[in-house]
Image (cartoon, grey):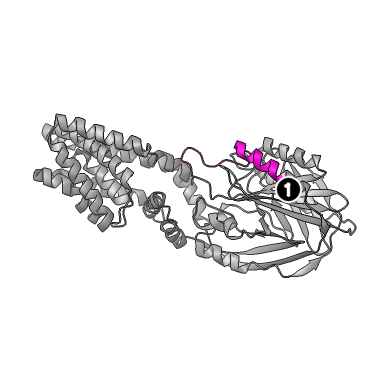
Amino acid sequence: MNAEKLYRKLFVLPGKVTVVGIFLLTTILLSVLENKIIILVTLLLLTIAASRKFLGLKFDAKRSLFLTTLISFLSFLSYKLFGTFSGSFFLFLAVIHFCSERGAIYSALMASIPFLILDYGSIPFLVVSFVLFYAYLLYLDFGWDFGFRKYVESFIKFWLTEDPRFVESVLSENSEVFEGKVRCLGIGNAKVISTDFHPGPFRNIGGAKLVNFLDFPNSVYLHSPTTHEKDPVSEEDVLKIKEALKCDAEYLRPKRPFEIEGNNFKIFCFPFDKKRLIFVSGKKRIDDFELESGNFVVDCHNANFYKSLSEKEVEEIRYLVKKAEEVETDFVEAKSAFVKMYAESESVVSYVSAILLDFGEKFAIVVFDSNNVDLIFRNKVEEEFAKIGFKAIVCSTDNHSKTGIRVKESYKPAGGCEEDYRILENLIEKCKSAKLEKSDFTYSENKVAVKVLGGLLRKFEKVSERSDRYIRLFLLLVMINFLIPLFTLLL
């Protein structure tokens, strides 16, 4: 579901100073034209304050002033054109209902207070508006088998409060249980962590906290071949995954690494006697894909684009990985060093790191805690590491905790802002002084069953396709409600 697109349509407001200015200017101007506006504005502000206390309305001062301004303006037009303030009731009721924690009846009773005080004769208009609004609520659930209206209400409350429990509670009701692996590869003092679960869906909901919860001073997270269907739905599920993580297992003997190149992807394989670490890097683009393997396969997520891989591309990945699992090489001695920097930018969530490896040939596993990597920036990373003698394998964690933070964009990949280039410079400097030492390699994996999005994700994608329809219908009903007094006058 393109939740950020919906957010941009519904929740973008001007800044605080602008909102206050608009509120004062509108109130003064309308009051000059109609003295009852002062009473209406006062009643609206008191109703919103009461709704915050008794209905759990999730509004701050800025949103309260903005809503009051909008309803006051529409009510003024309704009063001057049709002799009643009630033309704005539908919109006021809808906002109170969707942004509070009580049902439609309580919201209607609260929202009607200003209109009843100003004009007791508006009861028939308020009743008709309520019927239209309730019909709209029923329509939101029509054709769905998972209570779509409840999801709409929970997402709105989440965006207003940043409290993920509103969304996590309803996601859990329609989730699926999936048993996946949690892997830990020890390279010297570093711990490379991966899971069969996906970081997401976005912000601080459920699995979006996965990378953050598995972040330790000596660890790095690598994205596995998985999709958003494997997003854990709640913080409780993420904690179960964290508890399943163990890094005290069997030793591995390293073998000589090798590379395999296809038309669209390149494989870096680090074989051991009992397991293989396999990186899938996109030449021009890469995003989520799935495959079955008994080895430690990594989706480098390192060539950003905004579509999905084709089935032909996924088949190429599967072919290359299978081929990498069959190639045999000799045992070698290995040295390593681990560099990790905590840093943040518009695209980097919390850290960048590099695992430096020397198998006779030097490699650097460079990880950006971000959602994918800009290809031009990746080329820059590879060039800078080549200058200090390392072949860089650039990866991102596919962390979604910044997704949707800004309403004008979904996310920026690593390299999406100037700060990332400065972060890269600092990382290179630290790697120059890092001392590689002979290292042990260990591996462990455990299974854990948690609730994930599963088929619910496909339903959300269908919802996204219909979102414009729901919004257009809502706006049409707002207009119809505004014109109800006109229909009454004509009759």
What residue is rendered at 49% in x and 45% in y?
405
In this orientation, which residue lies closer to the viewer: 121 or 11? Answer: 11
The answer to whether residue 211 shows anywhere in this view is yes
> 269 or 487: nearer the eye?
269
Does residue 110 appear to the left or right of 301 in the view shown? left
Residue of label 1: 430
Is residue 177 something that shows in the picture?
A: no
Residue situated furthest right in the rendering: 330
Along the line of sight, the residue nearer the viewer: 476 or 420: 420
Residue type (three-letter) at the residue carrying disc 1: Lys
Residue drawn at 50 percent across, 62 percent down: 235
The image quarter containing residue 384 is top right
Q: Nearer the viewer, residue 342 or 176?
A: 342
Q: Position of residue 273 (x, y in %)?
A: 83, 63
Query: Residue placed at 24% from the left, 32% from the top?
Result: 26
The residue depicted at 28 percent of the width and 46 percent of the height is 94
- For mark 1, give the secondary structure: helix
* Left or right of 360 on screen, residue 216: left
Q: Quadrant of residue 417?
A: top right
Magenta span includes 407 = yes
Q: Which part of the image, by quadrant, shows the C terminus?
A: top left
State the image coordinates of residue 459 (x, y, percent, origin top left): 48, 51
Report the span colored magenta: 406-427
In the displayed structure image, the side of residue 446 where residue 39 appears, left or right = left
Query: How many residues crowd around disc 1 within 10 Å: few (fewer than 14), some, or many (20 or more)?
Result: some
Q: Position of residue 193 (x, y in %)?
A: 67, 59
**Quick check: is 109 in the magenta stretch?**
no
Residue 315 place in picture, x, y as percent: 71, 47
Give the tally of numbered discs. Answer: 1
